[in-house]
Structures are given as C-alpha cells and as structure tokens.
Amino acid sequence: MIQALCCGIIVLAAAADQLIKYAVLHSSLAAGETVTLIPHVLQLRYVENTGAAFSLLSDHTVLLSVVTAAVIAAGVVLILSGRIRSRFLSVVIACVLAGGLGNLIDRIFRGFVVDYIEVLFVNFAVFNFADCFVTVGEFLLIAYLLYDIVKSPKKGVKKPDGAE
C-alpha cells in the first residue's frame, strides 16, 4: 500500500511541476523578465538552467540526466522492494524522487531546467516546484536519519561471555 502512495506522489508531483513549467513557458514572461508577486519577498523570473543546484555543472545536461535517471531508478526499486520499513521514510524518498523526475523531464525534452521562483529577501538562486520537493525531502531525510541515530541504542562490540 505504501508503495502505491509513493508512486502516486512521484507521478502527481512531477506532473504538477510540469504543468507549472508549461504555464511559465507559455506566459508572456521572457527570459530574465520578472513579475513581482509579493513586493520585497517573492517574484517570478524565467531562467533556463543547464546545470544542477545553483547552476553547478552548467552545460553538463547529459551527465546530470544520466546520474538523475540512475538515482530515480534506484530509488523506485528501493521503494517497490518493500525494504524500507518506515512509511515516513518512504514518503520522504518519494518526494526527492518526484522533484528529480520533474527536473529530469526538463533536461531530456528541453535541454535545460525551467526555474521561475525567486525570493527577494535573501540572495538565493532562482528555483522551481521540483526543487522544493527535492530540498524539503532531503531536509526531512537528514532529520529522520539524525533522529534514528539518536534514538537507536548504542551498538557496541559484543563482549565474550564473562567479560565486563
């Protein structure tokens, strides 16, 4: 049952991401132009990103596509295998995969990722809906792993009988 939920999250979030990007691409917003949504807080800025986060590895679209596809495939296999015991962890991984899939679709069919969300109250990169899924998912994954480390009893080396 959790596998179906996770697959649904992946498909629906990637589809929503693509619909939003379609709207951005078919709006009157030209590359680099902005539309203020909330003054001094949030605006739309159309950017074609050929790299990864913060434009790292710009113009390495094929490499990024291959690595992303491999990670998504491995993540889907992991979810479908039922090896993940935590439902929360399964959903978190599905969120990361959904965001990755949304951006992978862009790289394959457009040759770049469509970014459009720009926050104005900090100096930050322009990003998109898929990036939100990846970022929130990774944050929750790290929080889950830290929680798991803290709550797990310390595992030491088993001492031989009679040893203290």
Image (cartoon, rainbow, N blue to C red):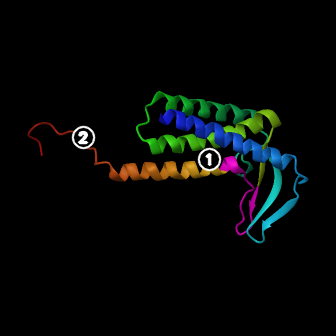
Residue 106 falls in image quadrant: top right
**Would you say the magenta stretch is mainly helix, strand or loop?**
loop
Packing grade of label 1 (10 A; few <14, some 14-19, many >=20) is: many
Q: Position of residue 45 (x, y in %)?
A: 82, 57
Residue farthest to the bottom?
40
Percent position of residue 103, x then y: 71, 41
Residue name at image x 76 percent, y 37 percent: 107
Given this view, does label 2 or label 1 mark the residue nearer the observer? 1
Residue at 8%, 40% in the rendered image: 162
What percent of the width, then of the height, locates residue 78?
A: 50, 31
Residue 101 image-quadrant placement: top right
Q: Which residue is mark 2?
A: 157
Q: Is residue 93 above or below residue 149?
A: above
Regarding mark 1 in the picture, which secondary structure is present there? Answer: helix
Identify the amino acid type marked 1: Val
**Pointer 2 and pointer 1: residues touching (CB < 8 Å)?**
no
Q: Indicate which disc residue 134 carries.
A: 1
- Magenta stretch holds residue 123: yes
- Please rate how many residues cluster around mark 2, counting C-alpha atoms within 10 Å: few if below 14, some from 14 to 19, many from 20: few
**Which secondary structure lies at badge 2?**
loop
Start-end of magenta stretch: 117-131
Q: Is residue 135 left or right of residue 88?
A: right
CA separation in Å, label 2 and label 1: 37 Å
Q: Amino acid at mark 2?
A: Val
Pick the residue in front: 62 or 96. 96
| Left-right relation of 70 to 41 | left
Q: Which mark is residue 31?
A: none
Residue sitting at x 68%, y 40%: 14
Q: Earlier in the sequence, mark 2 or mark 1?
A: 1
Residue 106 vs residue 24, the one in the foreground = 24
- Tell whether 122 sits left or right of 43: left
